[in-house]
Each structure stands twice: as structure tokens, then as C-alpha cells.
Image (cartoon, rainbow, N blue to C red):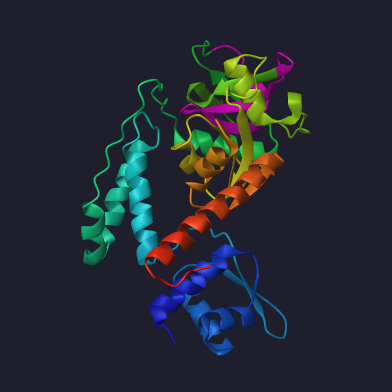
Amino acid sequence: MPKTSARLLALLSLLQSRRDWPGTLLADRLEISLRTVRRDVDRLRELGYPIAAAKGPDGGYRLSAGTELPPLLFDDEQAVALTVALQLAATTAGSGLAEAAARALTTIRQVLPARLRHRVSALQVIAVERPAARPAAPVDGDVLLAISAAVQAREVLRFDYGAEQADAPPRRAEPHHLVTWDGRWYLVAWDLDRADWRTFRADRIALRTPNGPRFTPRELPGGDVAGFVISKFRGSGDSSGGWPCQGTVLLDLPAATVALYSRDGVVEEAGPGRCRLTLGSWSWPSLAAAVARFDADIEVVGPADLADAFGHLARRLARTAAAFDAAQDRPSLS
């Protein structure tokens, strides 16, 4: 049986990975008794994690959202990954969240065990922007969260925009999508006063409260937000971004994380910890490889050529690994 601290980490990780967990299944996965599961759940509750129990013969558990942030528990790999991600965010030129990321990085480094502190301190990241890239416009994190919440709730936004006079009536728009393009955040919305679709730079939006009434979503021209955004900035006759191959996937990563490494793509939030990425490349296998570099679960939205390319790439990589194993006289993993 693993030590209590390691077992609690494993239990918490499982509870975060899906909505509901039967008690017996948790016991099987952790190789402990159902009684120990109950005891460990009680320990996590004492630490502040809101874990709800379901009635039934074996019982069940669900990690709910709480009103306060409980102590965060990370294993060694998660702690290192988190500090690396924060360092990248803190060194991204022009990022509106860079200062907050730097403060969070300092806080986490102070509580890291010595064995991990030495590992992460050895990694010094310097962000080098490509020459053609525009500096990212700083955006207040609270503004992004407020816009995202309005998109999810389907509530009309009221805001001042750019250099418009402060005494002018606020803009009113139905927010449909919050996306990133070429290092900037944009709101894709139906402008109620102009009766047309508009893209608003998030760094120029000054929100007014409260929000307006709820609205019924409209159909975006072409039905695809990535195509709409790309055609908006690269000419109305070209929705491919200039690439011969373009595809769309869902990634199990936050939109803000993916946006750091996909300036040429359109990134849209697709739920907590998930995003929709539309990217282009010169061939389907190269596009599949570009998406696979994010090291996350991938769901292909389309087209079928991209799904086929993932299969082709997987077979090629498997052959490469098998050839190396044979040359080194190692047992194959396949």
C-alpha cells in the first residue's frame, strides 16, 4: 500500500479526472479497501476539498467547486511542470498575466522541497519573440474571466471600447467566442447597435456592470469561428490562413496555455481546462506533429485528412521506435 501522502495525491488526481467515482472503483484503482477510501476522503475534506458523497450500496464521490481555494497538492512531476509553465508565462513579452505569473512562481518556489527547488532553479527561460510577431497586448486577467463568463452565460456585455469618449453610451454586444490570434485576445460578438458581427480586441475593452439580459446564440457566418477570424484578418476571400492544410482539434489544455505556443493558430475556450485549436501547415503529417507537441489528449474535429495523418504519423513513429529497439537489442514496447 502506498504511503498516506502519496495515496491522497493519487486519490485527489482521480477525483479531478472525472465527474463521479464509485467507491469500489476508487478502491480498485488505488489497491486499498473501501474503508480506507472513506478515511482518505475525510482527510481531504479536512484539508478543504469539497467532496460530495452519493448514496448507494458502495457509495460514490464527486469533487465539487468550493467557495475557498483549498491547499493544493502536487506530486513531483506536477510541481515541476507547474513552475516551468509559470516561468514561461512570466517571461512572455507583453503578456498581461506576466506579473501575476511571476508572483505565483515566487510563491511556489518558496514552498517547494529542496530536491525540487534545485531542479527548477537550474532552468532559466528567456522568451525570444520571432521578428515578425507583434508584441502581445497586455490584458487584465479579470477582464478575460469576465468576458469568458458572459460567453458561457449568454449575457449581453456593456463596455467602453478604445479611445471612445467616456460619456458616450456603452457598446452593447452579444459575446459568442473569446479567441486568441497572433498573440492577442479577441472577442467575437454580435454588435447590437450596428447589427453585425464584430471582433473586439480584449485589451481595449473596459467593461461596465452589470451585464445586460441573456440572449439566444446566433449562427456565425460560415459556422466556424476560426475561419471567420482568419478571413477577418487575412482577407475575406481566404479562410485558410494561407496554408494548404488546415485542421481543427480539441485539446485537454487551457486556452491560455495553448495560446503561448500557437501564434499562427486560432485558439478558443471549449470548457474548463479545454480549448479548440485551428492550425495550418504545409502537409497533413506536419500539422498532426505540430498538434501532438502539446502533449495532451487530442480530439480531431476535422477534416478526416488530419485524422488520417495522425494514424500515419503514429505508424511511422512506431516503426522508428521498433527499429531502434531492434538495433539496441531492447524489448519492444509494442
| Prevalent SS, magenta region | strand
What residue is at 68 percent from the left and 84 percent from the top? 58
What residue is at 53 percent from the left and 11 percent from the top? 164
Give the residue furthest to the front: 327
Question: Is residue 169 found inside the magenta-colored segment of the image?
Answer: yes
Residue 211 appears in the rendering: no
From the viewer's perspective, tell me whether residue 55 is left or right of residue 51: right
Check the image and report above or below for 205 versus 75: above
Residue 43 appears in the rendering: yes
Image quadrant where one finds the N terminus: bottom left
Q: Quadrant of residue 199?
A: top right
What residue is at 39 percent from the left and 70 percent from the top? 329
How far across and how far down the image is residue 217, in percent? 76, 33
How far across and how far down the image is residue 134, in percent? 41, 21
How far across and how far down the image is residue 112, in percent? 27, 62
How far across and how far down the image is residue 253, in percent? 52, 49
From the viewer's perspective, tell me whether residue 39 is left or right of residue 218: left
From the viewer's perspective, tell me whether residue 193 is left or right of residue 32: right
Check the image and report above or below for 97 versus 138: below
Check the image and report above or below for 34 versus 151: below
Question: Is residue 82 found inside the magenta-colored segment of the image?
Answer: no
Q: Relative to the observer, which residue lies in front, 137 or 234?
A: 234
What residue is at 38 percent from the left and 54 percent from the top? 82
From the viewer's perspective, tell me whether residue 303 is left or right of residue 5: right
Q: So how many labels did they put on this image?
A: 0
- Write the start and end of the magenta stretch as one range: 167-196
